[in-house]
Image (cartoon, coloured by chain):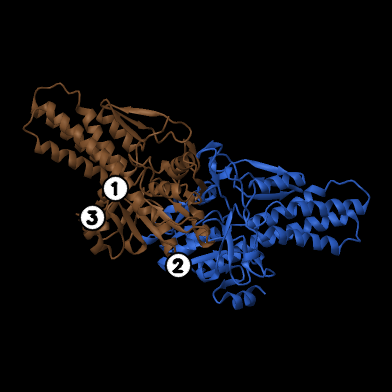
Chain colours: A brown, B blue
Amino acid sequence: MKHFSLSFKNSKLTIIDQTKLPLKVSYLEIKTIKDAFTAIKRLKVRGAPLIGVFAGYSVYVSIKNIKTKSKKAFLKTVFNNIQHLKISRPTAVNLFWALDRIQNKIIANKNRSIKTIKTVIKNESRAIHNEDIKLCQGIAAFGAKLIKPKDAILTHCNAGFLATSGQGTALAIIYRAHKRYPGIKVFADETRPLLQGARLTAWELTSRKIDTTLICDNAAAALIKAGQIDKTIVGADRITKDGAAANKIGTYSLAVLCKYHKIPFYVAAPSSTFDLNLRSWRSIPIEERSPQEIKSVFGKAIAPKKVKAYNPAFDITPPQLITAIITEKGIIRPPYGKNIKKVIG
Amino acid sequence: MKHFSLSFKNSKLTIIDQTKLPLKVSYLEIKTIKDAFTAIKRLKVRGAPLIGVFAGYSVYVSIKNIKTKSKKAFLKTVFNNIQHLKISRPTAVNLFWALDRIQNKIIANKNRSIKTIKTVIKNESRAIHNEDIKLCQGIAAFGAKLIKPKDAILTHCNAGFLATSGQGTALAIIYRAHKRYPGIKVFADETRPLLQGARLTAWELTSRKIDTTLICDNAAAALIKAGQIDKTIVGADRITKDGAAANKIGTYSLAVLCKYHKIPFYVAAPSSTFDLNLRSWRSIPIEERSPQEIKSVFGKAIAPKKVKAYNPAFDITPPQLITAIITEKGIIRPPYGKNIKKVIG
């Protein structure tokens, strides 16, 4: 069986449970808004673009069986469900973007029948899904042009088919480039505390037969210094109109290290990741997760009970550290203030 | 009971088993050279200065009960044991330094009785031990002068009482400064893959009631950028005459980050950590440890079986990234080529 991050067939929403990987490949059906909220919150489903697609379908499956004849009661439930999902995670903009799209479609069709509104939600979710697959293809096509035959590429966290409903963002570029240049190599940061690099990226890349080496996050600097890395490509959870990128904690660290050692640092993300309304990167809320995620690994304590731990899930990389942003609409280079407007709109 | 890293009493050598911390405090008696070798190799005992002290006593306990009357046979065993310990770990110079001291003492006394030579080994080991305790005190006294009342100090790996037979190197400074300035705070990098920061440093610091926050290695950059770190202090396993420092993997990363953000980066180490014979940092052997240390945590797999992992135990920080080296003989500042010679000899 070919693995997938998310499937929507016969109105059934199924996801791979990412918290179980790589030890166990198990799929999970989402039936209620509570299922969906928990799946996002506990990172059973993750990756900024995938969360967007997932959120749309989640709203649909959560209301598809509502039997009421009262439009008011129906819409109240739908909007409540949308609002509830919005508070599941704060940083990735794709979640809000997708839910707003669904909400706007509902509002535009609010005078139509409950049955029709249900179909509108389903169709809009499917549209977001299909677009996401195409966005990944676009990013892959533009990004692959930046890859050379023997490149050693560093990546952080997971920006692959597990993070999208298509082939990924950063990893889609690698998959595309690998077809042309089978000699490329990838170094994957393990990405503490939740080890998305070790658990997800290493699993994806080895399942695609790509030469992959796992490293601890703190070893990247020494590898870069030794000339063993040609470029870094990461995904993003939110990008401002000035080109600052929020992404998994540790991304900023890599960006500084690449700048210091003069190697390219690329961010790959679809246009839905841009938040052009944001006044400044300072307005991006950074999710702070439980200290327990640091203090234990798979339930096993690795630190004294009484020590404090600080666990921000994301950091912000300023535009001056980003060599280029790879989108489905093209490769955006500095000055970002001007060029993001030109390419993204 | 007050915890200790190593004790030598009534000719019995006992160490705390550092692989069991922080979940279990258990002590281990070392009786044979095989015990000693395994303890070093498996990091039951670790920390450059502590390994030096431990190696001396290990040679003694491994030969104290030899009954032979043949001087030749006795010396052969002693020298074999010394040689064997030398291949336990390659990077920290203190191991070789201590074993060479013992060996030179034996050679200088080789015409004396077996009983006397045994006493010579014991006394030299005790001398190394007593010196180590004083070296820590010296480093603490000089280093504490660099600390301000409200400092937030970042440290990596473990350079405390578990890494020496005294109060430590980097952490000894913090212990000393804390007596004067109880408002200081410490951020401890967890230090993957073996988590010496989470398991050992967090345990040490909280047991001494110091305000400690554990972070993932990849979060240091964002904290530094946010102005939450005033300075970084780490230990070292070997320092060249030009001031390049080998230390736990991830140290170089921090040094670059401190340089980029213009905060001080200090290395604390006794004079026994300097290897003045080395022509260049390129001659420092970097221990590469098993990929399994990355791919599993406490025996639990966290990565796919078939993925490769690269696990260097150390990296090298070049002199231009080090603000000062804190030794028991004083604080050494650049230019290191000149000033190390002046202070260390």
Query: For the residue carrying disc 2, how many other residues have a C-alpha within 10 Å: few (<14), some (14-19), or many (20+)?
Result: some
State the residue lying farthest toward the left.
A111
User: In this rendering, does residue A119 appear at all?
Assistant: yes
Q: Which of the two discs, 1 and 3, labels the residue nearer the N terminus?
A: 1
- Whether A295 is drawn above or below B241: the answer is above
Instruction: Write down the quadrant of residue B308 in the picture.
Output: top right
Q: Quadrant of residue B183?
A: bottom left
Where disc 2 sits, the SS reads: helix
- Residues flagged by tags 1 and 2 on a common chain: no
Horizontal and vertical percent position of residue B213: 43, 51
* Residue indicated by mark 1: A91
Please tell me whether mark 1 sits on a helix, a strand or a loop: loop
> Label 1 is placed on what type of residue?
Thr
Determine which residue is flagged by label 3.
A344
Residue that badge 2 annotates: B259
Q: Position of residue B222 (x, y in %)?
A: 38, 57
